[in-house]
Image (cartoon, helix red, strand yellow):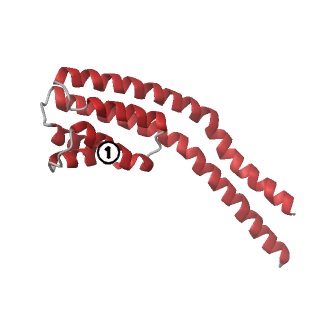
Amino acid sequence: MLAMFKLIASLLIICSAGLAGLRAASAYSLRSRQLRTLQEALQLLDTEIMYGATPLPAALSKVAAAAGDAVGTVFREAGDMLGKGSGLTAGEAWNLAVDRNIRRTAFTQEDRAILRSFGEALGSSDRAEQHKHITLTTYHLRQEEEKAERERQKNERIWKYGGFLVGIGIVLLLL
């Protein structure tokens, strides 16, 4: 009976540590995916502004629907604030939406700084200038995505296997 209890406890420890490692590893993949989604969303926003001549609140809402989940929430909230006539400028609405929703994403402070910088220029110039700002922001986000991908390749495997190995180490120490 005692041996069975030890076996079950050991399996629980190993599985718990392994799952913690898998969760930490998934954060690296999530950031890369969300940065890619954000770049695609900005390209869609660029298209809506440049070729669709869509008003900014409607364009932000369209992009939000296409982007989905955490990234789309920023666009949706900024579009809602502008659409309701809250008295905020487009940049203020964008930065407020970024600040409120950054914790729901896997974005870092560098990503946040890029998004806030984009917000400063949002809606404050003509379509051609907006296109330039979106292109510049996309370029910076692409650099961050490349950096995130390097970090993922470097750290993901360590966390995946490290969690299980730590669990095994704990079990060996307890036995």
Quarter occupied by residue 60: top left
Residue name at image x 27 percent, y 48 percent: 77
Q: Please provide percent x and percent y for residue 133.
A: 29, 24
Q: Where is residue 22 in the image (x, y as percent from the top left)?
A: 61, 49
Task: Name which residue type carries label 1.
Answer: Leu
Quarter residue 130 falls in: top left
- Residue pictured at 15% horizontal, 47% vertical: 83
Indicate the quadrant where residue 58 lies.
top left
Please identify the residue farthest to the front as the structure is shown: 87
Decide which of 58, 162 is in the foreground and name it. 58
Circle 1 — which element? helix
Q: In this view, does 92 lie to the left or right of 53?
A: right
Quadrant containing the N terminus in the rendered view: bottom right
Is residue 70 visible to the viewer in this orientation of the structure? no
> Can you see residue 46?
yes
Q: Nearer the viewer, residue 107 or 19?
A: 107
Residue picked out by circle 1 = 96
